[in-house]
Amino acid sequence: MNKFYILLFSILILTSCGNKREGEEKTGLLSHLFSLSDNEANGIDEILEFYGGSCEYLFGVSASTNEGTKKYFEIKISQSDAIDELLDKVHLPSSNIAYRFYKNLKEEKKNYDIIKVILISSNNKKEEFDFPITFLEKAEKRIKVAERTISLIKEKQFEELKKMFNDEISLLEKDEFILRLKEIEPQLGNILEFRLFGFKITKIKNVESIHVSAAIIRDKQSNEYSVDLEFNSDKYEVSQIQYEL
């Protein structure tokens, strides 16, 4: 049966990387009924700071004969050079935008079922993505595991890091990896920040996994960093860690 959607309401507000949102007075259709919370505004600001460009966002409710009623928050990014450079890896900015907005929310999380992300390239190509809140909740837990690996590297706790490898699905020879890590870490310098780029769902040895892409910002030489983890697990385990220098 074909899906049938009815848009019940939406509010559209336009902002850009050059606008200051603090103290801004919002106007527009139904703006007297709906406005961004501080947490939602912080999420939008974080996205614009990361990607630049222009951002349109709206609140909406859709009804479907198959899926029932769904509440969503939609974020549309355009005129972003940073996103144009990632069109061959569009899963990165789309997931990163959804997650950066989501992680700023507190009580607001119960207001939506889905975070919708729309990316408009410089040649007007449109890409659309849906990220259910339940999916982002699970992703957040696994990203915290990825952040834990960075903390252990920063603290030079390499043996503790080695214990995190899941031997059943690991793609690395962990002893060799830790040995190499000890060799290159002093050359790269002190870790200042873990900067998330995005994530995607993959399969590793037929196990549903999440591939987390990031950068390690350092005082000498920053590097790209990725971690693969079993997605439907609560364990602090990883299957693979990759450095790109």
Image (tube, grey):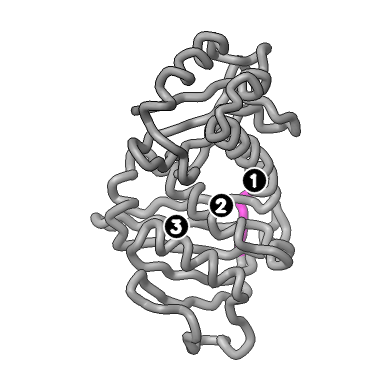
Name which residue type carries label 1. Answer: Glu
Disc 2 designates what residue? 99
Q: Residues within 10 Å of mark 3 (few under 14, many from 20)?
A: many
The front one of 174 and 191 is 191
Write the residue at 59% across / 81% down: 35
Q: Is residue 103 visible?
A: yes
Q: Is residue 4 magenta?
A: yes
Residue type at tag 3: Ile
Residue 162: image quadrant is: top right
Which label lies toward us, 3 or 2? 2
The disc placed on residue 204 is none
Q: Residue at x 30, y 55 (%)?
A: 121
In the image shown, does 101 or 22 lie closer to the viewer? Answer: 22
- C-alpha gap between disc 1 and disc 3: 21 Å
Task: Tell me if label 1 and label 3 are in contact, CB under 8 Å.
Answer: no
Up-down relation of residue 179 to residue 149 (above or below): above
- Residue type beneath disc 2: Tyr
- Residue at which label 3 appears: 118
| Residue 7 visible somewhere in the drawing | no
Indicate which disc, 1 or 3, sits on the residue closer to the N terminus: 3
Q: Nearer the viewer, residue 183 or 20?
A: 183
Q: Callout 2: helix, strand or loop?
A: helix
Q: Is residue 24 magenta?
A: no
Q: Which residue is mark 1?
A: 140
Q: Which residue is at a point 40% across and 34% down the rendered structure image?
A: 189
Circle 2 crowding by C-alpha within 10 Å: few under 14, some 14–19, many from 20: many
Q: Secondary structure at mark 3?
A: strand
Span colored in magenta: 1-5
Residue 81: give x, y in percent of width and height. 27, 55
Position of residue 137 measured from the top left corner of the image (x, y, whole percent) = 69, 48
Marks 1/2 in contact by CB < 8 Å: the verdict is yes
